[in-house]
Image: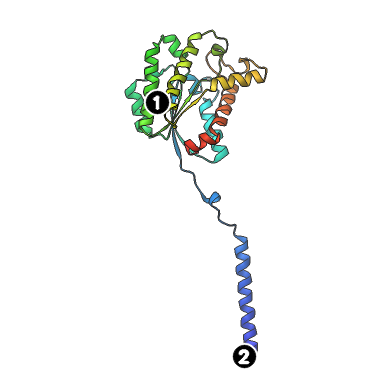
Amino acid sequence: MSRTRGLMRLTKNLLILSVALVTLAAVPPCSATATAVLPVRRVLLVGGSAAHGWLDPHRDSYLQRALATVHAATGQAFKVSDHTIPGETAVGIGWARYQRWVRMAHPDIVILSWGLLNDVHQHTPMSAYDAAMLNEIAVARQAGADVLLVTPPVTKASATNGWPLEHQYMQAELRDAEFYAVRDQHVHVIDLFSQMQATLMARSQTYRPYSADWAHPNRAGHRLAGQLLAEDLLQPYLRASLNL
């Protein structure tokens, strides 16, 4: 009788063990990759009408498109404070207003991308432009943000050299950003204009399929510029620096 009871108890225990093993097998292993949640990165966008997405049907600018592509590729979420303003310039926004934007946004990343034709029309003195650009970078760094200086996409005006002063301002902003970049690993220069120009040459294309007017990209122009900028942001050295 005791032997029968012992066999029954053993059978019952084996049954319980087998059910437990099946249950464990059905639950997927918990991995750090599956459960990790990337912290939201706060981004401040500063620029003019092209950076604002002017003449894109949905105001979906190359800056916004690039961040969306990075999010899709990495899962990194962004909280964007968009202070791109059509018709505005680096000098025009003024020190106090820019400082207020930085203070309110608490950005991890500041992206500066001026279109420069507004400066051409307003005859901005180069000394004033240099001072404004250096100030924007300095204020962002003092707030602990990484800075990306992004040159504007190719447009009819820049591609045809009809506005040579635009290139002078562009060279000035590159020079100002590189002044910081060689001393500070958290300041980055992305010459999107030259990258887009090289891409069009490689495709044997002109600016025409990508321009809405003489000063702004169309939807295809914003899409191409956003794709190129996203490829830059996804480079290992930038991902590491920006914690993406």
Q: Residues within 10 Å of mark 2 (few under 14, many from 20)?
A: few
Camera sees residue 67? yes
Q: Which label number is shown at residue 2?
A: 2
Residue 182, numbered circle: none
Q: Position of residue 69 (x, y in %)?
A: 56, 34
Residue at x 51% of width, y 49% of height:
36
Q: Position of residue 22 (x, y in %)?
A: 63, 66
Q: How many marks?
A: 2
Local SS, label 2: helix
Residue found at x 38% / y 30%: 141
- Residue extending farthest to the bottom is 1
What amino acid is labelled 1 in the image?
A: Ile
- Kindly identify which residue carries mark 1: 137
Q: In the rendered image, which quarter is residue 135 located in?
A: top left
Quarter of the image where the N terminus is located: bottom right
- Which of the two discs, 2 and 1, sits closer to the camera? 1
Residue at screen point 54% across, 37% down: 71
The outermost residue toward the front is: 183
Does residue 60 show up?
Answer: no
In three-dimensional space, the C-alpha distance between marks 2 and 1, rounded to whole angstroms, equals 85 Å
Q: Residues within 10 Å of mark 1 (few under 14, many from 20)?
A: many
Sequence-wise first label, 2 or 1: 2
Report whether 71 appears left or right of 105: right
Q: Position of residue 179 (x, y in %)?
A: 42, 23
Label 1's element?
A: helix
Q: Nearer the viewer, residue 140 or 94?
A: 140
Q: Amino acid at mark 2?
A: Ser
Q: Height in image: 10 above or below 106?
A: below
